[in-house]
Image: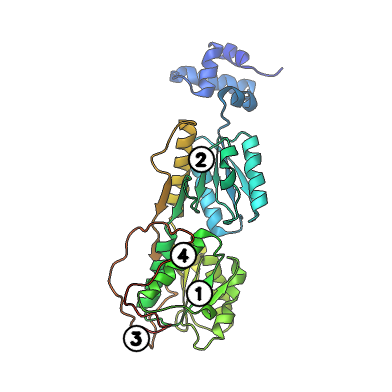
Amino acid sequence: MKATIRSVAKLAGVAPSTVSHYLNQTAPLSAATAKSVEEAIAALNYRVNLGARSLRLRKTNSIGVVIPNITSPFFGEIAAVMENRLWERGFQTLLCISERSPERELSQVAHLVSRQVDGILLVYCSQKSRVAETLSDISVPIVFVDRRVPDQYSVCTDNFLGGRLAGRHLATLGHRVIGLLCGEPSVENVAERIQGFQVELQRFGLEIPEAYKAKGRQDLQLGLRITDLLQLDPRPTAIFATNDIVAIGAWRKLVESGFRIPRDISIVGFDDIAISRFLVPPLTTVAQPYREIGAKAVELLVDLVQAGETGKPAQENVILAPTLKIRGSTAPLKKGGAGKAIDGRLPQRTKPVPPKSKRSSRKGASRRPFKS
């Protein structure tokens, strides 16, 4: 015979309402009473009817997480942080992988809503994402992670500042011929990294000609295209890759081609995934605070869930500052000068860059390609 709350209450010697309070944590119980209920539940192998509970409480204690892919170490690491934080807060995680498809992503969000999740954490796949257009039809709160959506709850890195950090580092090392491995500029955070990098180089009187930019999807294959840049004259003495995976792809091709890092060429990545620290030499990179991003996104979403439809969090867009991790993959240029900085300061935080904004170089600064 299937165990019920009444049979549990009878065995524990308490009222059915006491068992209900224990299961739902709706009233304090003495340690002795709680122990009696626990022992009765274990003895009868009682299982809570989660469907009935969710209908009654209108909550399922589950959160949907949607990421572009699981093979990316960065997305895997941030998803792990969010799952752990949700577990600590008493939520189960339903993970979906959009595989960079806007249609699949939209379908997954709709499915999660139909499964009555309490909220959704979403790393959208591209600027073509249609989720933001349908928010008025989605009945649960959504927090956008790693990628900013105007006027919506989101947590991300200051990517423009991150690009500036990388640009300043290479310029002050004396590099004047710099190549750029550009991930998808259709994704706003990648576009901001590229823009920040180029704006900072302009402060040194530098620009990167189009021929020195290899563009493509942000994966290992893009990194292999460094061979296109190595055939240019003059050959780049430094490379900025818009994420660490691209940098690692370039790294492999350089080693296969007989180049020594950083003696022959310096490389800077972006993200600070775990493997970047174990390369020989370790990769210099712009570190995203992915633990803070994941933890803050969960905190923001849980606040929204607990506040209900009328609740408003303290912040809508949370933008966290990145840091530059200087390691062994970058070194001063042997020939060509020290690359003196214009000043010694960088702002700790910059405002997000609108997708269509235009930034000009500092008034009076030279804009001759590869000349200080």
* Residue highlighted by disc 4: 193
Of labels 2 and 1, earlier in sequence is 2
Instruction: Decide which of 101, 44 is in the foreground and name it.
Output: 101
What is the distance, in whole Å, between disc 4 and disc 1 at their CAs?
11 Å
Of labels 4 and 2, earlier in sequence is 2
Q: Dot 3 lies on which element?
A: loop
Of labels 4 and 3, earlier in sequence is 4
Residue found 56% across the figure and 29% down from its top: 59
Residue 204 image offset from top left, x and y in percent: 35, 77
Of labels 4 and 1, earlier in sequence is 1
Of labels 3 and 1, earlier in sequence is 1
* Residue highlighted by disc 1: 180
* Residue highlighted by disc 2: 86
What is the distance, in whole Å, between disc 4 and disc 3 at their CAs?
26 Å
Residue found 55% across the figure and 36% down from its top: 140
> Visible in this render: residue 277?
no
Which quadrant of the figure has residue 57?
top right
The three-letter amino acid code for the residue at tag 4 is: Arg
Residue 360 image offset from top left, x and y in percent: 39, 70
What is the distance, in whole Å, between disc 4 and disc 2 at their CAs?
30 Å
Which quarter of the rendering shows the N terminus? top right
Nearer the observer: mark 2 or 1; the answer is 1
